[in-house]
Amino acid sequence: MVPVEYYLVLSAAVFSIGLYGLLTRENALFFLMSVELMLNAANINFIAFSAQWGNLTGQTFSLFVMALAAAEVAVGIGIILVLYRNFKDVDVTVPQEMRW
Amino acid sequence: MVTAPPMTPTYLLGLTALAVLLYDSLRTDDGGAGVLTGISVVGALASLGTAGWFLTADTGLVAGMSEFSGAVVVDGMSLFFTALFAAVTVLVTLGAHDYDPIDGKRGELYGLVLLAATGMSVMASANSLATAFVALELASLPSYALVAFLKQDRGSTEAGLKYFLIGALSSAIFVFGISLVYAATGSLLLPDIAAAFESGLGERTGIAGVGVLMIAGGVAYKTASVPFHFWAPEAYEGAPAPVSAFLSSASKAAGFALAFRVFVVGFPLGAATSAGIDWALLFQILAVATMVLGNFAAATQDKVKRMLAYSSIGHAGYVLIGLAALSAEASTNGDVMGAAMAHLFVYGFMNTGAFLFVALAENWGVGRRFEDYNGLGAEKPFAAVAMTAFLFSLAGVPPLGGFFSKLFLFAGAVDAGLWWLAVIAVINSSLSLYYYSRVVRALWFEEGDHDLSGAPTALYAALAIALVGTVVLLPGFGPVIETAQEAATALFA
């Protein structure tokens, strides 16, 4: 059996890649993909430790996470669509109506 | 005898949302705004009434009753917060009835507000991290859509985008934190996690520590606390004003409700501290950073709505004292957390009222800056009196509701031995009087020239209810704080 530390390293790596993408990308769609990576990093943990602990809680919850990720993307795409109509771009740095 | 299910207040909110959406999709004419508002207000009032009844009648619910194999628990705290969410929903839907920019789309707005309120109510009941995450998303997803509600408006779109981006980031951090806690303890149920903490985590303490930190990050986003506060000024400024009112009061309270239960029940402070995970210290740092940043930034604003947004960050800092002043085995825990809950309750009225006045001003077409409010007091005295009461209550001027809740909160911090935290809070609170009184001065003491048309009835009614809430909580504060402290103490038992 693969030691659990390996899973933790893998999920931490995927999470960090997602976080890096999220902080550096300016395109809103890449932003969504980065968030997806971060959520799936959590899923890796859930499934790996579900096997480790011998209960199904983690596996079941990873299904929840996937469903909610889809719902989140649906709302996000809607907002990005409105963004494109108003600003003619999907670059998250373009909207500057209000100062940060 | 038929017994009502313990979660009736939550179900009522959800059913009302469905009723609103059903009526909205079936109606054939363009009118129906009155019916939509009526359904929403009646449904939310029914939820408020049921929650209040469960809370005061001898139902045995205050002690706690778990549902769905322990994934959800109904107790004094969840009923207290559900009553708060329902009350804010009443105010917001009533106030939005006369808010012109959303004409023709009221059904969607009310439906989303009610769905978000349902999610918040479940957040207050969540006894498992799985429920907590699902409820958090049920509260968040409608909120994103609500902030971006004015599709033609660039400000609203930008606000919705920023709110969504930071929300998606923080929910990813939150769920990764949950996965780490699961990795360390093998369960998502809060009592089981607590049992794992009590019996020692061994070599997995580090994983659990990072997990707890990340869950705190998710909570910080929902409550608009440092370090995930920076969406708040944008989202509140760009969103339609009734939505800002809803988010800054109900959404913040929901974040705290979740934090109170997850941290107190799930990560018992005694066991966590001896394992090196001292989350009370974390919240002390966050409380100071949040209140200082919120209040100082609010003092430099030139737009009223943005000032209220930063002041709402400042208030999140005060309420964080309710978590920061906890300690293992202390008898003061229930009192200080109860005071934080009572402050959120009073805040639900005074802050919603202040944002509804901004909605009124937007409807009149006066500008967004402080000087645009000049002379409104002479022309619309009732609304201006209400706004003045909200602002003074927010600042904590006696004898308004906000004074008493702050008094109990700061006294709780002193009792817990954190006198320095109370001193910082008092200094911040007195600074806040400066920027709140700038609005009051503009309203009453400056000359202005406005061409105002109309006194929208429903919006005025909402203002009046919020005013009654803010003022009546003066004599009525005793029962509120007693209920809150009783509910909070039950959490530590």
Image: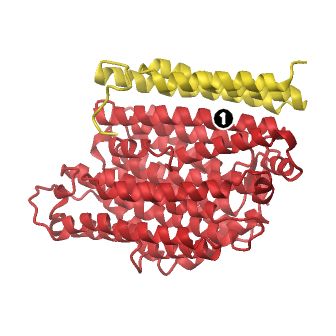
List x then y, in percent, for residue B76. 69, 63
List x then y, in percent, for residue A68. 62, 29
List x then y, in percent, for residue B465. 40, 66
SS at mark 1? helix
Any part of residue B400 in sight: yes
Q: Residue at x 32, y 55 (%)?
A: B307
Chain holding disc 1: B
**As drawn, is B54 to the left or to the right of B43?**
right
**As drawn, is B206 to the left or to the right of B404?**
right
Any part of residue B91 in sight: no
Colouring used for the render: by chain
Q: Nearer the viewer, residue A43 or A65?
A: A43
Q: Nearer the viewer, residue B22 or B191?
A: B191
- Chain A, colour shown: yellow
Task: Give the labeled residue for mark 1.
Answer: B175
Q: Nearer the viewer, residue B363 or A42?
A: A42
The chain whose colour is red is: B
Q: Nearer the viewer, residue B349 or B109?
A: B349
Give the quadrant of the C terminus of chain B: bottom right
* Rendered view: B471 above or below B183: below
**As drawn, is B212 to the left or to the right of B379?**
right
Q: Residue at x 47, y 63 (%)?
A: B347
Q: Residues within 10 Å of mark 1 (few under 14, many from 20)?
A: many
* Rendered view: B152 above or below B138: above
List x then y, in percent, for residue B400. 42, 76
Q: Residue at x 62, y 70 (%)?
A: B336
Give the quadrant of the N terminus of chain B: bottom right
Q: Amino acid at mark 1?
A: Val
